[in-house]
Image: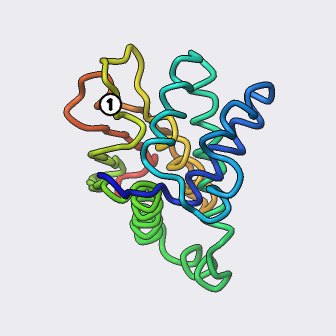
Amino acid sequence: MIGVEIGRVLVASMHQAIADELPSRVEFYDHWLGGKRMRDGSVGLAPMTAVLGFLRAEGQPYHDVMKRAGLYAADWMVDSMNAIERRFILALPRWLRLRSVLRLVARTIRSGYEPTKVKIRLRKGEVALEIRNSLFCRTRETQSAALCDFHAALVVQVLNRFNLPSTVAIEQCTGTQGEMCLVGIHTGTAE
């Protein structure tokens, strides 16, 4: 894992979420995320792991930061898409749009941390998003609460942006001794 760098959108969304949710702590987290490293996209695994560890120690603010970072990452990903591509996806029939958008979600998750593996299982309006080797769930000790808030918020926001309202639940988390991170998505229709 030496030399693994964290994706720019992930770093920027985390930095902005920390600034919004923990404004008095921004300077502390800037040591790892801010400045030249963030601008040139060279935030490595060690600094990001440190940031996540310190955020988890903050308690509830960890979950607030992760949710907000997921929303930012989703919006920035969708906003950076070619307008023609966005309109094309929106014009697709619902069942095909759902599949296209889930592929975008998987690609966005993988772009944040390259070793992450994402598998999508779709059946009768229920989606299981299996995430293995998630950056957020790399912990030394078992956690009491799921750590996949970033992924859940990202999924909900991207689906909403493409007129696919859904409800999401974190069903398993590697950080809480789950076999994998499993985000369950209910789209409301049997497709």
Does residue 119 appear left or right of residue 66 in this picture? left
Q: Quadrant of residue 139?
A: top left
Considering depth in this image, is 2 or 25 the residue closer to the camera? 2
* Total labels drawn: 1
Quarter where residue 29 is shown:
top right
At 31% across and 39% down in the image, what residue appears?
182
Please indicate, yes or no, whether residue 172 appears anywhere in the rendered image: no
One can see residue 60 in this view? yes
Residue 101 horizontal side relative to residue 78, left or right: left
Horizontal and vertical percent position of residue 82: 64, 82
Residue 13, position as x, y percentages in the image: 64, 49
Viewer-closest of 12 and 45: 45
Q: Quadrant of the C terminus?
A: bottom left
Using the image, determine if residue 181 lies above or below residue 123.
Answer: above
- How many neighbours does mark 1 have within 10 angstroms: few (below 14), some (14-19), or many (20 or more)? many
Q: Mark 1 — residue?
A: 173
| In-image side of 43 versus 122 (left or right) | right
For residue 127, above or below residue 95: above
Q: Is residue 179 left or right of residue 146?
A: left
Residue 19 image position (x, y, % from top left): 76, 37
Q: Residue furthest bottom?
A: 84
What amino acid does circle 1 point to? Cys
How far across and how far down the image is residue 186, in percent?
42, 43
Mark 1 lies on a secondary structure that is: loop
Q: Quadrant of residue 60?
A: top right
Residue closer to the observer: 13 or 37:
37
* Residue in the picture at 32% in, 30% down: 173
Question: Residue, x 64% and y 56% (percent of image)?
Answer: 38
